[in-house]
Amino acid sequence: MALLPILRYPDSRLHTVARPVTEVDDSIRRLVKDMAETMYEAPGIGLAATQVDVHRRVVVIDVSEDKSGLIALINPEILERSGEQVCEEGCLSVPGVYEKVTRAERVKVKALNDKGEPFELEAEGLLAVCIQHEIDHLDGKVFVEYLSPLKLGRIKTKLAKKARITA
């Protein structure tokens, strides 16, 4: 397994819409393992392939306390949304930034697992938020883009300043 470099906002590659996976083969299984290792090391609770500059519809998520609940979603599609919740979100591609975002409270999603088998999953709370956040990445959208133009401008300024300091 290998750690993958995570793209940082506002990198334009984060706006690439991911292509569907046509076959779940060894390369996709390797991608899932590498993404999981990268997510745990970061540390985070979700990672989309887009964030590691692989523009395929693959997501890994683990919202468990002990990192024992890894879920791989290949070609995920939200079938149903219900309710509404406001949660503070962060993102491995936007380090150090946490903002409130409104999301569906419950979702039903269909996807393939890392064996290529179809399954459906009903999620609520943090898992539902994470699924929506990661699917947004596959669609080329970053959570900060839900914020007001003023907040987004401040975040871009903060990230640019931080990039200059670390460069």
Image (cartoon, helix red, strand yellow):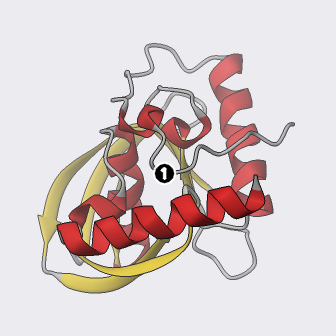
Total labels: the figure holds: 1
* Direction from residue 67 to residue 44 in the image, left or right: left
In the picture, measured across the screen, residue 79 lies left or right of residue 94, that is: left
Instruction: Please indicate whether residue 12 sits to the left or right of residue 54 in the image.
Output: left
- Picture coordinates of residue 57, whole percent (x, y): 43, 32
Q: Which residue is mark 1?
A: 9
Q: Is residue 91 visible?
A: no
Rendered view: 10 above or below 4: below
Image coords of residue 80 (percent x, y) = 15, 58
* x and y, in percent, of residue 109 in the image: 30, 52
Vertical side of 3 occupied by 16: above or below:
above
Residue at 22% x, 73% y: name it: 150
Indicate the amino acid at tag 1.
Answer: Tyr
Q: Position of residue 52 (x, y in %)?
A: 61, 38
* Residue 50 visible (yes or no): yes
Quarter of the image with the N terminus is top right
Find residue 53 and report its image quarter.
top right
Task: Place residue 138 in its image quadrant.
Answer: top left
Question: Residue sitting at 43 percent across and 14 percent down?
Answer: 22
Residue occupying image coordinates x 63% and y 24%: 28
Q: Residue at x 64, y 66 (%)?
A: 44
Outermost residue toward the right? 1
User: Is the residue 66 above or below the residue 3 in the image?
Assistant: below
| Element class at badge 1 | loop
| Above or below 151: residue 136 | above
Q: Which of 137 and 110 lies nearest the eye of the viewer?
A: 137
10 Å crowding of disc 1: few (<14), some (14-19), many (20+): many
